[in-house]
Amino acid sequence: MTRTVTDVICPFCGTLCDDLEVVVSDDGKDLLEVYNACAIGAEKFLHSQAKDRITRPRMRQEDGSWKEISYDEAVNYTARMLADAKKPLMYGWSSTNCEAQSVGAEIGEAVGAVMDNTATVCHGTSLIAVQDIGIPSCTLGEVKNRADRVLFWGCNPAHAHPRHMSRYSIFPRGFFTGKGHTGRKVIVVDPRPTDTASLADIHLQVEQGHDYELLDALRVAFRGEKLPDFVGGIPKAKIYEVAETLKSGRFAIIFFGMGVTQSIGKNHNIDIAIAVTRDLNEYTKAAIMPMRGHYNVTGSGQVWGWQFGFPFAVDLSRGFARYNPGETTSNDLLRRDEVDAVFVLGSDPGAHFPFSSVKKIYDLPSVVIDPHETPTSEVCKVHVPVAFVGVEIGGCAYRMDNVPIETRKVVDAPEGMMTDEEFLTRVLARVKELKGV
Amino acid sequence: MAIRVNLITGRTIQQGVAMEAGEEKPAYTTACGIIELDPADFKELGAFRNTNVRVTSNHGSVVVKAVEATQGPHPGVAYIPMGPWANMVVNPNTYSTGMPTFKGTSVQVEVAKSEPVLGSLELVRKGCRGELS
């Protein structure tokens, strides 16, 4: 016999879908099928059942091979590495629950670490912009029930947030949006005609890296002022058309992604996108929202926000919280040789940092906590596999619109495996012993 | 023959699925060890589809398989899905924001038929040990 667990939360992207159904074996040990999830979410659940999964910590030997070690040894190694370091980097924190993030922050305080999360290579520049000029935002529920003008700028949810469009932004019928997608005008701004663009009423194929100019042109167009013939490769008639489309709506929502946060201009691209939203509020109701990537990167910012006052790049090495992106951010610290140990949890910098930073991790004492074997585990000295949050252990996660959702456990982890929180709690206790506090 | 294009990176659904299925597996290399080129750029390069190419920037070099753009046309723009292959060549400069410049790196693409596309773990391992050509 099998049983079906309903209302399961998907721990993949920031959309944090909460309607999955998972079929598990009667004894709760095997996960058999996943319904309602996108291809990526389903794969995440199913991969937890992989037969070749690593279930015990491993330490790198001199000849490059792995040697299995116990969790006790892994705890001791990690605590010692962190306690001995002058300024360790504790990076990741996005694919785990808020409870683990909180314990991690306590360790960071005890050892004087720099705490950074994946926003540093994702929406870190958005956070800088929000601190500069604020953000008029809303929840995804409001988008579903009210938005009739939807603008995707430099993001491709068809690939990165596959169910975002069907659950919230384009297709659903809401309280004031009873016609579903036929009642919505969709605009996509992207240098490629993406699969998301194929669903749009208007696609602006902006020249890559010219988002700031085009956003600024929209502000000009809202006011009916004169534009040059082309801005960022887009003819002015098209820009006026988009401006009119946005102004004529009852509720406009702008979603933005890596196309603007990672292109040249960085946080200033977001500044101007937020300013566009603010201007639009002169004519109608408008809101803007970052398309957060990891399912709980938002939660990491929330936890540190209330613990330290800053959402990422928190330097605790002086005994109090400092924040200075460009100085206290992971890639800058690594490239400038300003950290002397690296601890990674719930992220894969080995695959997603520029290689010059990966090489620095390889050269330093390093520990990675991750259920998967990844390029990060390939360059670290100790790899500690743990239970999958959202599959084998529950815990709080924050959706991209800052709504907290409690994830659910659906199956047991393989016997004897620790969770992130358990491992960190042990490391914290050992760090306190070593530090004599 | 070599061409110069503007490289951007980002997620594809194949990248996401393969990443969750295991980055050590060949499917991850198939999903991310590629460069999506526009048909016009293929013509200029003088290469068949599915040819291995060497992509070189001021910041590094990597061998990937050239495939036709799935979300095109975008002449002059090339796309490598986010992952260790793209990160060999992207501009790591953060310009004091903390964010490397993952999108908008000028790269040179040349045919490299005889050079293999390495798996993710091997690529990172060899890179760290200085064993990459």
Image (tube, coloured by chain):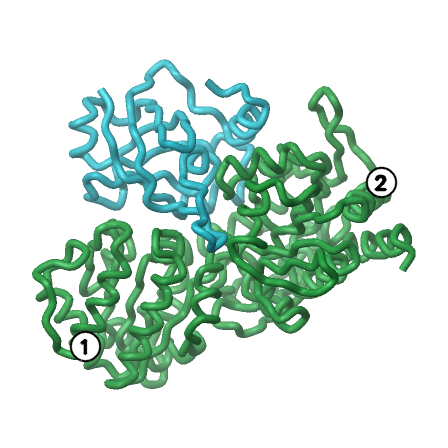
Chain colours: A green, B cyan
Residue named by callout 1: A222
Chain under numbered label 1: A
Q: Secondary structure at mark 1?
A: helix
Residue A400 seen in this snapshot: yes
Q: Is residue A253 above or below residue A234?
A: below
Q: Which residue is mark 2?
A: A73
Q: Earlier in the sequence, mark 2 or mark 1?
A: 2
Q: Please tell me which residue is depicted at 19% across the width and 81% down the height of the picture.
A: A248
- Sort mark 2 into few (<14), some (14-19) or many (20+) by Cα contacts within 10 Å: some
Residue A178 vertical position relative to residue A305 in the rendered view, above or below: below
Percent position of residue B115, x then y = 39, 17
Q: Amino acid at mark 2?
A: Glu
Q: Badge 1: few (under 14), some or many (20 or more) residues near its Cα, within 10 Å? A: many
Q: Nearer the viewer, mark 2 or mark 1?
A: 1
Q: Tell me what residue is drawn at x 65 percent, y 59 percent.
A: A410
From the viewer's perspective, tell me whether residue B87 is left or right of residue A82.
Answer: left
Is residue A173 or residue A362 the one in the foreground? A362
Report the Cα–Cα distance between label 2 and label 1.
62 Å
Give the letter of the chain under mark 2.
A
For the C terminus of chain A, the image quarter is bottom right
